[in-house]
Each structure stands twice: as C-alpha cells, then as structure tokens.
C-alpha cells in the first residue's frame, strides 16, 4: 500500500510530494526519454517515428464509433501540408482558446473544453507543455507533454505525424494554419488513453484531472432557486486558479462526480446515484433554436455582476469548442441588453464576434444547463461564504482482487474532529479513480466502481471491519458508476468513519487511487493489510504446498524452485524465458525462514505466496507494455506501491545487485529483490521497538541486508 499525505492551504499551489512521478521529475511514459531520443535523432539527422504510438490504425482505434473509412487515412508531418511559404510552429503569438476548433469527426469536446480552459491559466498550461521544443534548429520530429495519471505525472513523447482524411486534418484543427500545439497535445492525450477512438466520448472532469492533477466536483443545476443562488456565489467567488466547464442538456443527466445538494445535510452513510451518459459531440448533435448544442460540453471563461438601472445583472461567459455557434437569447453578442450597461462595462465585456464565446444571464444558464464542473488543486471553491481554511490530502494506492465478500475490499478509517464541523459547507471530499487504461482493458467500458462511508462508534484501528458489520441494513444493493473516477463532497459530524471503495464486478482485478481531503492532518488510517487477510486466502496456496512439499509437510529449496517455476511463474503472462534458479529459491526461502532451518512450513509458505502475488500484481500494472523488465524509476514506483520506503542510495544498490547491464530488472529478479526488501524491513521492526531503541538506524540495517 502506498500513501502520500500533504498539507494544502489556499492560495498556494498544491503542496504535495508524490512518491512517483512529479512535475519536476515525471515518469517517462513507455520508458521514452525525450532528450535522449531527440539528441539521438539530431545526431543522425533523422526524424523521430514513435513505435509506441504508430502512425496506423492501431493508434486510431477500430473506427467503429467514428463513422469514418479508416482505409483512407494518411499521416503527414506539418511541413508536408501547411500553406506554401509558412513555417510550422508549436505556438504562434501565445496560446488562446481560439486556437482550438473541434473536428466534427471526433466527439472530444469534453477534452477540448478542458484544454481551452487551460489557455486561461498560462501557468497550468506551461506545466504540461514544456518550453524546450519548437520547429527550430532542434527540431527532430519529436515533442513531449506532461499529463497526470493515477496520482503521478508522466512525460509522454510523441512524433508529429498527424492523421488526414480526404485532404483535411482528421481531428482537432488549429485556427492558425501553421500552429500545432492543439493537435500535438490531443495526440499525447490519445496516446495516454491508448487510441484516438478513446477520445470519442468522456467527461470534462476526466480531462481536467489529467491536465492539472487537481480535484473536480460536479454540481447539479436543476435544484431549487436557493441552491442555484448559492452556486452562483460559489463560482463567482472561486479562486483565480479554478477551472470550470458545463454541460448543456434538458434531458435528465445525473452527474457521476457529484456533490450533495446545498444547503448540505450531514449523513452517516452516503450512496451514489448512477452515472450520466458520457459526452461525445459531433455533427449529429442537434443545435437548438436558442443556439446551444444538446448534451455538449462548454468551457466557462468568466463571470460578471454588473450594475443596471434597477439592480444588477449576473452574467456568465461560455466558450463552444466548435469555435463557432453561440447563445441567441438575452445578452448574446448583439442583444439590446448591452445598452443598459455603463459604457465602461459595455466596452469591457461586449465583443461581437462569431468565435464560439458568448455571455448569457445566470438565470437562463442555470435553467438551460444541467451541470457545472469545478476543478482546482484543492477544493477551496467549497469555502465560499466562509473564511478559507486548510485542506489536507491523503493519497492511497491499492488494488481490488477477486473476492466474494464486501469486507474483502480495502478499508480506510477517517476521523472528523469537532473543530472540523460545519453548518453549511463541506469538511470531507473523497475521490476514487481507476486507471485510464481500464476502459480499453475491459472491452471498451470502465469497471463499475463506487465507495461507501460507514459511521463507526468505536473501532480498533488495527483491524478492518468484519463481514458481520456489513449486514443487509447497512449494505443494501450496491450501486456503481461505470466511470473513470467518482468524487463526492459531504459534511460529516465529528466521529470516526470507514470508507470502503469497491467494484461490483468482483471477478476483475484492478488498481485504484483513493484521495481523501480533510480539514485536519493525519486523520486517515488504512485498516486492511496483507497479514490480516491471509486467513481467508490460504486454500489455493495450501493445495499447491501439499503438492510440492516433501511428504506434504515441508518445502526445501529444490521443492520451492520447482513449485515457483511450474506454478507461480506460469501465471505471469510475460516471463520471457526467465526462471527461478536454485540460488534464487534459497534466497526466497531464507527471507521467510527467520529460524534458519532451510525449510518452509505451510504458514510461512502462505505468507511468501501472498507477498509474491502482491508484487506480481504491482509489476503487471507498472509494466503496461509487457516488456518484462522494470527500470530504476519503475522499480522505485513498485517499492512505493508495496508500502516500503527506501533512499536513492538503497535503490541504486538494489539495481546494481538485481539489474542487468542496462540497469533493468527482470520479473524473477524483481520478485527476489522485493522479497528481500520486505524481509529486511520486517526483521528490523521485529528486532526493535517500532524502529527505535537501537544503535543502528533502519537505512543502515537494510543496506547491510543487501
């Protein structure tokens, strides 16, 4: 289990030190190093071709949802098709949301509206678009972008081959003929998701999170007038770093990243409503008589409250990712309502131009649109109407494994202090996220996920809640959303609560990230643990043990080697011929044999099997390309996900001992390394009083063990 805590206080940016890829040192997606690749191609005077996201139908997708003839697609670099006499550029005269024009062949307005929002926050856009690239002397056909995925920043390398159909760019089209940052950023995002087709539908919240690393919440605009007035105060007082989007749709749409209705009601257990239909807008979507597009995503670019002769006008400004098509009602670009304003306000706000950006009155907006989405690094937009207070975030990585009972899911206890109670507002925000690749992994649909919050009167923090706790009254029929992530804000009374994330497809295994925002520090505890769940999972291991153990009661090194090679490694789909050697088997046996007998009995064998299974699952998740190796950065990530802490010096020792000449660690050597590290850590804690009261510190102890 990997946990990261941070203190968050407005208006500073997110103060968090993830144990994986950071903005300053992102993980290299597919192990592709931008500088190494660019320098190599510059030296050879060749242009980079990205084999990890090739210029063929694999990167496009099947095309079944796109209504295009994929056989006619061509791939070209910008210099091959821009107007004669022009030079391609990444950015021309700065970035603007007017640089973006959505293609009518791909329904990614949800992503483009989030991309457009970033142009309003230059610092956020600079975070994801490094400045060390252009169509200049260092051009080698290669670019890179940083995106946030499952709790870490990744650096995504792409080539600049773009898909064409019938002589036109297939997807996003820049407004300037020689400016290509929108096309290349869209391509990097498609690579993260696995193909362009995976951009064809989605939610703005998903894109906001990937582009900022922030937290998003969705608010229902179909509530009572009082609630809509409160939402106006929330968005009009939101901090300058808050990004906003909205979805137009008269039909029933239930937001899956929801907040509770305002004013907030405190509850002891909270359930999810079912998710909404995803947004995928192309030319088939109807433009209504009021100028708005049904179920379309719009970017919120501003708000204004301006004086009139008889009161005030509350206005909200929106942008259509199509780059055209605007509101035709009150306060549209040519509306006579503008004559009611003072000249200075009219000069500041009114702009007559069919560029997709327009103003409309808040009253009409709150009636016409179904949801509004807010995103920031911290949920400070929830502090409207009261003095801003600190937020503390805990990030928890874990994995769902196949299980038959609800109590087998990971459990986390949170403590709400009396000083954290609020009358109207929120003191807890919880976000559950699954991997962006799960949609592709599970046949084009997300795993159905959810979480429940249970109030507990008294709870031993060392034990998870037993199966008997989750009776029918507490656990009615589970509802889940087939969405990448779910976020909910709530106001809870002082006390202890247990959060249980789950998927209703219990035969599936998948990694998840749980983020918990609280008003107080160090108030989250993981209840589930490897050792505590062993008694429920030993049956399969016992069968294996009896099959290979000498006389069915003990395993020696040779028995263990045969067992691992014939059973355990067979379960791993990409071993590439690696096998456990007798020395490796002896090392594993020694790590689980503190008495030094040279043999394993059933109990220790089950512990070893469970550890190896945990490490195998971590390896499979990190090695997404199935190359069968981990580099040093990926090994660091694996160690962190296993809940172990090591220094860079110890990591280097591990790579030197278990890696090959390229400093890569294969699957078997990785298991040996992790088992040894786990044993060293556990032995140290057994010989000390929680790591205290000795003359040698834990780091030196672990180094001696290696």
Image: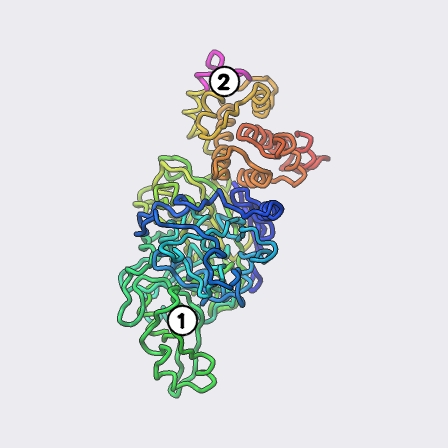
Q: In the depicted view, which residue is nearer to us: 45 or 606? A: 45
Q: Is residue 570 left or right of residue 630?
A: left
Residue 679: quarter of image:
top right
Residue ID for mark 2: 562
Residues marked 1 and 2 touching at CB (< 8 Å): no
Q: Earlier in the sequence, mark 1 or mark 2?
A: 1
Residue 307, percent from left and from top: 43, 84
For residue 277, side relative to residue 627 (left or right): left
In the displayed structure image, the side of residue 169 where residue 479 appears, left or right: left
Q: Is residue 544 above or below residue 123?
A: above
Nearest to the eye among marks 1 and 2: give it.
Answer: 1
Residue marked by disc 1: 355
Q: Position of residue 393 (x, y in %)?
A: 52, 53
> Residue at point 65% right, 37% down?
652
Give me the disc on residue 588: none
Note whether 76 is above or below 505 in the view shown: below
Q: Position of residue 230 (x, y in %)?
A: 40, 70
In this view, the residue farthest toward the right is 695
Q: Position of residue 477 (x, y in %)?
A: 30, 45
- Residue at the far front: name it: 84
User: In the rendered structure, does residue 275 fall within the stretch colored magenta?
Assistant: no
Magenta stretch in the rendered image: 545-560
Q: How many marks?
A: 2
Quadrant in which the C terminus appears: top right
Asked if residue 14 shows in the view, the reply is no
* Label 2 SS: helix
Q: Residue at 49% of width from left, 42% of height from top?
A: 51
Residue reaching furthest to the top = 551
* Nearest the eye: 321 or 89: 89
């Amino acid at each position: 289990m990997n946990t990261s805590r941070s203190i968050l206080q407005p208006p500073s940016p997110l103060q968090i030190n993830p144990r994986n890829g950071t903005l300053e040192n992102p993980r290299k997606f597919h192990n592709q190093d931008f500088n190494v690749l660019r320098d190599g191609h510059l030296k050879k005077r060749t242009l980079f071709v990205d084999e990890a996201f090739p210029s063929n139908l694999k990167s496009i997708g099947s095309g079944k949802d796109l209504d295009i003839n994929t056989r006619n697609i061509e791939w070209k670099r910008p210099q091959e098709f821009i107007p004669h006499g022009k030079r391609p550029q990444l950015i021309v005269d700065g970035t603007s949301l007017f640089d973006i024009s959505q293609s009518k062949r791909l329904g990614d307005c949800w992503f483009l509206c989030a991309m457009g929002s970033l142009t309003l926050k230059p610092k956020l856009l600079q975070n994801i678009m490094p400045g060390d690239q252009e169509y200049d002397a260092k051009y080698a056909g290669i670019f890179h972008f940083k995106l946030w995925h499952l709790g870490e920043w990744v650096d995504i390398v792409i080539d600049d081959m773009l898909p064409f159909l019938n002589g036109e760019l297939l997807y996003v089209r820049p407004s300037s003929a020689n400016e290509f940052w929108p096309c290349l950023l869209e391509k990097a995002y498609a690579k993260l998701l696995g193909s362009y087709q995976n951009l064809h539908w989605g939610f703005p919240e998903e894109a906001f999170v990937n582009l900022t690393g922030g937290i998003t919440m969705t608010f229902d605009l179909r509530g009572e007038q009082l609630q809509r007035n409160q939402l106006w105060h929330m968005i009009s007082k939101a901090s300058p770093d808050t990004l906003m989007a909205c979805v137009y749709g008269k039909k029933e749409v239930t937001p899956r990243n929801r907040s509770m209705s305002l004013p907030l009601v405190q509850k002891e257990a909270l359930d999810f409503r079912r998710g909404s239909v995803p947004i995928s807008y192309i030319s088939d979507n109807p433009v209504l008589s009021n100028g708005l597009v049904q179920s379309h995503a719009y970017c919120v670019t501003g708000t204004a409250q301006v004086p009139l002769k008889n009161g005030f006008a509350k206005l909200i400004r929106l942008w259509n990712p199509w780059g055209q098509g605007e509101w035709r009602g009150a306060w549209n670009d040519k509306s006579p309502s503008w004559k009611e304003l003072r000249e200075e306000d009219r000069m500041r706000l009114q702009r007559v131009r069919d560029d997709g950006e327009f103003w409309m009155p808040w009253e009409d907006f709150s009636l016409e649109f179904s949801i509004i989405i807010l995103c920031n690094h911290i949920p400070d937009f929830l502090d409207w109407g009261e003095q801003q207070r600190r937020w503390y975030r805990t990030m928890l990585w874990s994995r769902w494994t196949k299980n038959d009972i609800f109590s087998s899911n990971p459990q986390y206890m949170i403590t709400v202090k009396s000083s954290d109670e609020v009358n109207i507002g929120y003191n807890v925000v919880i976000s559950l996220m699954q991997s962006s690749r799960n949609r592709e992994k599970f046949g084009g649909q997300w795993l159905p996920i959810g979480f429940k919050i249970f109030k507990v009167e008294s709870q031993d923090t060392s034990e998870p809640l037993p199966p008997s706790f989750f009776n029918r009254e507490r656990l009615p029929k589970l509802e889940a959303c087939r969405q990448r992530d779910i976020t909910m804000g709530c106001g809870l009374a002082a006390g202890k609560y247990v959060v249980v994330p789950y998927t209703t497809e219990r035969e599936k295994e998948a990694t998840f990230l749980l983020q918990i925002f609280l008003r107080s520090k160090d108030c989250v505890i993981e209840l589930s643990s490897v050792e505590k769940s062993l008694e429920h999972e030993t049956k399969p291991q016992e069968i294996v043990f009896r099959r290979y153990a000498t006389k069915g009661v003990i395993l020696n090194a040779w028995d263990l080697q045969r067992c691992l090679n014939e059973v355990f490694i067979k379960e791993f789909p990409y071993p590439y011929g690696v096998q456990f050697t007798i020395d490796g088997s002896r090392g594993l046996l020694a790590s689980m044999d503190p008495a030094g007998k040279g043999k394993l009995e059933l109990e220790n064998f089950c512990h070893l099997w469970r550890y190896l299974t945990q490490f195998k699952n971590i390896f499979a998740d990190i090695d997404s390309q199935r190359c069968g190796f981990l580099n040093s950065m990926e090994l660091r990530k694996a160690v962190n996900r296993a809940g172990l802490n090591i220094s860079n010096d110890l990591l280097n020792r591990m790579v030197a001992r278990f890696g090959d000449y390229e400093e890569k660690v294969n699957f078997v050597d990785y298991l040996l390394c992790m088992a040894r590290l786990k044993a060293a850590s556990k032995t140290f804690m057994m010989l000390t009083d929680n790591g205290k009261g000795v003359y040698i510190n834990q780091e030196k102890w672990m180094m001696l063990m290696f």
